[in-house]
Amino acid sequence: MSDAVRRIYVEKRRGFDIEARDLFQDLKENLRIHGLKEARIVNRYDISGISEGEYAMAWNLIFSEPPLDYVFDEELPVSPEDKVFAVEYLPGQFDQRADSAAQCVQILTQKEQPLVQTARVIVLKGDISDEDLAKIKNYCINPVESREASLVKPETLEMETVVPEDVAFLAGFTSMSPKELHSLLEDLGLAMSLEDLVFCQQYFRDSEKRNPTITEIRVLDTYWSDHCRHTTFMSDIEEVKIEEGRFTAPVKTAFREYLASREYLYGEEQKGRKICLMDIALIGMKELKKRGKLTDLDESDEINACSIIVTAEVDGRREEWLVMFKNETHNHPTEIEPFGGAATCLGGAIRDPLSGRVYVYQALRVTGSGDPRARVEDTLPGKLPQRKITTGAAAGFSSYGNQIGLATGQVAEVYNQGFIAKRMEIGAVIGAAPRKNVVRKKPAEGDVVLLVGGKTGRDGCGGATGSSKEHTMESLYSCGAEVQKGNPPTERKIQRLFRDPRASKLIKKCNDFGAGGVSVAIGELTDSLDINLDAVPKKYEGLDGTELAISESQERMAVVVAPEDVETFCSLAREENLEAAVVAGVTSSGRLKMFWRGKPIVDLSRGFLNTSGVRQKTRVRVLPPDEENCYFEIMPEAAAAELPDLRKAWLANLRDLNVCSQKGLAERFDSTIGAGTVLMPFGGKYQETPALGMVARLPVLDGETSTATAMTFGYNPALACWSPFHGAMYAVVEAVTKIVALGGDYRKVRLTLQEYFEKLGKDPSRWGKPFSALLGAFYAQKELEVPAIGG
């Protein structure tokens, strides 16, 4: 084995250099670099820790494909006139290309894994000024995830690590004045409110009688974030004012219906029960359940995803199955790092039902974008170009799905100028498993918590609180650590492990590592826990206790098993090449404790944690929709301009981005993985007509089944902007109508809702938007007797 660093350049041969040609076209058309004559993209590998012979074997077996690639050793041939620069991931960001190369070399050598670092070298030919080069670099390098790499080969690939200091206590916290607390809130960049921080101060002063550690404040900030605890939806609504207008009568009717439902459900108790957005979201489901019209709901202490019990027919036998579905947004991460944000949107959506021990077999993607044809120079300050976001996000989502082996049955992108301010990225998935394979038991004292899957790094630190903050021009440059990097092959291994009944039946309870990392994924499993952060597998050294507690590194699961089942479960995990580590134990203390370097750095009462901070209060004012610009009475501008010529008006409307074909976008996604797809995304005589939804058979391992699931969506951004109430009501009606058109029974429809609004703040009229939207969804649920069982 040699520690010498070797360098390899790999470039696609002419005819296979599709990515380079796409970049050339992009720079010519969108950046208008008219002097550009040619663009080359070369993958650069630096490797150490292998012998000369092993290096020679890996040359054509791992790093390149001889029929497709040119390979250059140590030096890349370029002309003196060429402009050359390299791009690499920021230190600490997961590099899948480097990781895969290192694993493949290890398989080849059957020795220790070598060190591998990669970069993309971009070579530009033509008459390119320094100003043009700076513009190209700015376009190709996203500072959130990457940086310009040196062209000089390093002497070593060993990562320099600094030994972190012990976790500090916040000296004087319990005696700080409100002004000092406000300064602390800003200095630490906390997402919690000042009222929450004052609440923390009272707790530590009066109950714990000590100052908190910085880790405890970070954990509380994460645990109580809007992302984890839905604090916005749980805010008390103290006053509701629905203004008079031509189109607000149905809003008032729906509100009266909601109040009647509260009285039916809660009786006298409803007088002391505050109205909140969460109550409006859930009340339709609660009422139908009480009336005996929701008999297939699967209820448990685990909140993994929407779950129903279905009877499937497998080889002529009737079996009980659990079907779970979930939708997830990654709006902010995709906005600042499109590929990684969209990839982990799908990865996170998969892990929710996967933690319920079901096999995820189909995905649906709905996104919202500004016009991707807009000129790059018109991009808003602090934003990425819409084209870059749209294409990068599509590449990220499809890459993750294709690698993990998940069929993406429907892809739809809606366009509206409002999405320029913030993109919408939604992934919805559906999974299923035989009910007998899913065991749910309450964790008992002495049980063990295992961390299964990926290792922990700095990627994703602050993701939960990041999604709860208001974002500004600086977000693009300051939030890099909040964006996770996905590793789909590892999640694929977890899918295989959890599909094995020998493993799934050992799991008492499971939670996925999403927002909040260890603090939430393990912290939510049971009331009393001792967590050993030193036992958490790390991607690299140098992580401190706080980072280990809140990192949101992807593809990890926390599972509770009985102590006698630990070795069996770990053995099954090793069969799938998965790491499983004992990281926590269930106690009876009623406290969440975390230890690092053998010292307690978190020691919090479960009762205090579960308060979710200070319950916020707000007022709601529902404004009437604009009567002069009624959505139902106005024709699209492009079509109206061509009237009275109906043919021209019709063709003009077909050119609208929300009307024209999206086949080119959809074909980036594989819709047939798993051989369970019933409906292809496009059908008809010419295979050009988009399907109304996606349909797939249940993922039966052995045997045949004709039992299938269908999923659709409903959303019209123009209608929702004009009236959130009508937008939500029609979204439900549209989604249900599509199911019926696909041949489904509307009585078996179960909904999952997703909201999308600006930061609400203290403005009652802003709060009126999600309030009226939820009323619209509730009204449609009540009239159709179709419940929303999650979101």
Image (tube, rainbow, N blue to C red):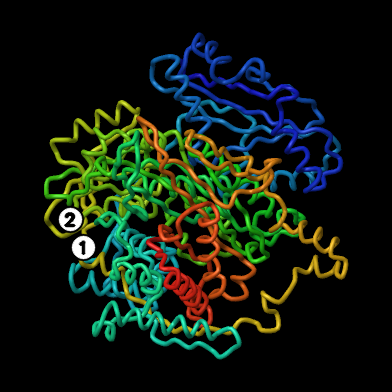
Mark 2 sits on what residue? 528
Residue located farthest toward the top when viewing the structure as drawn: 53
Residue 167, relative to residue 569: is it above or below?
below
Please name the amino acid that badge 1 sits on: Arg
Q: Is residue 180 visible?
A: no
Query: Measuring 69% from the left and 48% from the top, which residue is drawn there?
Result: 138
Residue 337 percent across, percent down from the top left:
57, 50
Residue located farthest toward the front when viewing the structure as drawn: 316
**What is the tally of numbered marks visible in this picture?**
2
Q: Is residue 282 left or right of residue 331?
A: left
Q: Is residue 427 visible?
A: yes
Q: Is residue 102 left or right of residue 377?
A: left
Q: Is residue 623 left or right of residue 775?
A: right
In the picture, residue 122 is in which quadrant?
Answer: top right
Q: Residues within 10 Å of mark 1 (few under 14, many from 20)?
A: some
Element under disc 2: loop
Separation of disc 2 and disc 1 at Cα? 7 Å
Q: Residues within 10 Å of mark 2 (few under 14, many from 20)?
A: many
Residue 261 percent across, percent down from the top left:
35, 79
- Circles 2 and 1: CB distance less than 8 Å? yes
Please name the amino acid that badge 2 sits on: Ser
Viewer-proximal residue, 473 or 253? 253
Query: Measuring 37% from the left and 50% from the top, which residue is drawn there?
Result: 324
Give whichever of discs 2 and 1 has the lower sequence position: 2
Query: Measuring 35% from the left and 40% from the top, which residue is drawn there?
Result: 313
Query: Disc number at residue 606?
Result: 1
